[in-house]
Image: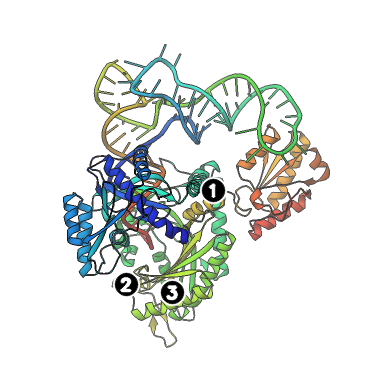
Amino acid sequence: MEAMSDSDDQLYPMRHSLAHIMAAAVQHLWPEAKFGVGPVVENGFYYDVDLGETKLSEEDFGRIEAEMAKIIEADEPFERLEMPVDDAITWAQQNEQPYKEELLNDLKRAGTTAAKDLSQDEMGTIAEGGSAVENVSFYRNGDFTDLCRGPHVESTGKVGAFKLQRVSGAYWRGNEQNAQMQRIYGVAFATEKELRQHLAMLEEAKKRDHRRLGQELDLFIFSDMVGSGLPLFTPRGTVLREELAAFSNSLRERHGFQKVWIPHMTKRALYEASGHWDKFGDELFLVKSQETSDELVLKPMNCPHHTRIYAAQPRSYRDLPIRYLETTTVYRDEKSGELGGLNRVRSITQDDSHVFCRQDQIEAEINNLLAAAGELYAVVDMKLRVRLSYRDDGDGYLGSAELWQSAQEQLKNAVVAAKLNYFEQDGEAAFYGPKIDFMATDALGREHQVATVQLDFVQPERFGLEYAADDDGRVRPVMIHCALLGSIERFLAVYIEHTAGRFPVWLAPEQIRVISVNQEAATVAFADKLARQAEALGLRLSVDNSNESVGKKIRAAEVAKVPYTVVIGQKEIESGEVVPRIRKDMAVHEGEAPIGLEQFLQTVANEAKTRVHKTSLHG
RNA sequence: GCCACCUUAGCUCAGCUGGUUAGAGCGGCGCUCUUGUAAAGCGUAGGUCGUCGGUUCGAAUCCGACAGGUGGCUCCA
């Protein structure tokens, strides 16, 4: 979320100490507690505990916090002890701490071999990672001793402000084969004020939650009868989807992509050929034909279909690159616990693109895509950062080492040329090729994975794709997958929260609301005229002619976050001018300024067309 | 899929430890008012308390299964 800073460095021992104090409190309350790991995380800390049959709930937080308060009140000094690993193992056995014992045993082995099996967190919890381990450290305060690398603050009184947040299940060492422990999370800051600020931010995030706004702004629904992870979009939500898709499509068309269309199901043979059946078969929705013996599946991706279009004709090196685009829905049978709002759904609409190109064209094609992505994220007003995901030394990567080398270089060159803020990470590549992952920062400073550009050396191979080179030899093209928005559903989730539902004019489901002062014939006729003019300009305008007070109707428009509201009555009918009420986030000029009707509508239409998020109008 | 918690009217929520006709605000509808930049007044209709089963003289309330949701874990081509 936020970058590490000096204050985070100071917070580290504090948060670490709080994890320790919480463990002490838990042990006071449940002496049989077995402890796992208790690391510092973003904004706080957690500790994994095993309480046997006892199930914690947030109602227990009061007791735990009260116990922690006692320990903090006592201001007990933290005492650091060191002992050889073998002695520590004896300690763990004597104190019946099997999880600690397991960690120590691994640590002992890691001392002589590579520490590969231990995750960073686990290593970090008990010892400095990587190097040979002889001694491990313990921290003691009062009657509680815990295996811990530290550092801790001097005494239990110096831990700042904290609050326990939630409890959840977590597998021991992140492996679902292992026992499930209870993870208690807390947030912690140096001062009460910072803690309050953080909690206020969480409060704001709650208000902006896309699920809540989706309901309040009437954008999408879920239905028990339709099923989990299958969102249905209302007329207003559909405007958002279609405007976003149209924008992404038009951007890509401008960058040389052609639209294609494919059916949403296919024989499973397609995925047996692509290799997806073996790897992801359990995520496919099966479709049974009642007429034939075909075994069909709903498409979980579009690339295999698109390769069929490519392969339907002999291709020459002169034809490349060939660029297809399609905004279409794929279906993936995600596990039930993984679904959530629009973030993870089972019907996923991707603004998908596939480039088939020569190896020497990779860099130019990536440049092309980065330009499109840059334009899109500038319009939606989100900062981008990219991760270059490379292969590591492991095997299991397909394609020659030289191809990878060259491809990774070309990716990086393109990212550097695009002046993107980037970082590189080995071992994050897909098995079929290196990739660029885009993270967008929202208005609350949270980062979200959105667009992605991936090179693919495998599918061209699997599907036997080729083109005729200048010497008439047969050569494999490289495939580039790209989605600018990622998925429309996930993008909407992020974007609704980014804007808090205050959509810019080009996306707003309702751009102008007209409020009548009364229901007299002249007023109604004037409203009708306005509506017709707006329609001619392609604007989304609605008229609120209900028999309510003007104040109430203004409020309704405000709550619906409509960009422009105009009140019409005798005055407007006579002058032909309106004073638009402008949604606060869009205003740049102070003061009121009446504007001719025609000019007002033209201006709004122009703002929609140019996709600006501020207005040139005066309120 | 796993752990914990949740599900009462269209929405937001009351309903104490099981006890006669399940409440409120907003929204809807009707009437009065014809209104000038964030909520006019009065009236009225909405619920087999997520579904199914069990315990009980009696279940919105207790138990179980299922469905859906929330927070995590695992996963995310």
Query: Mark 1 or mark 3, which is nearer to you?
Result: 1
**Proximity of marks 1 and 3: CB atoms separated by less than 8 Å:** no
Identify residue for label 1. Answer: A237
The answer for which chain carries disc 1 is: A
Please identify the quarter of the rendering in which residue B44 is found: top right
On what subunit does the disc labeled 3 rest? Answer: A
User: Does A527 appear above or below A134?
Assistant: above
Dot placed on the residue nearer the N-terminal end, 1 or 3: 1
Discs 1, 2: same chain: yes
Lateral position of residue A124 relative to residue A590, left or right:
left
Task: Give the crowd class for mark 2: few <14, some 14-19, many >=20 residues within 10 Å.
Answer: some
The reply, left or right, for residue A163 in relation to residue A115 is: right
Nearest the eye: A122 or A85: A85
Which amino acid does the dot numbered 2 rest on? Answer: Tyr
Query: Which residue corresponds to mark 3?
Result: A313
Mark-to-mark CA distance, 3 and 2: 29 Å
Q: Position of residue A450 (x, y in %)?
A: 47, 60
- Provide the residue designation for mark 2: A397
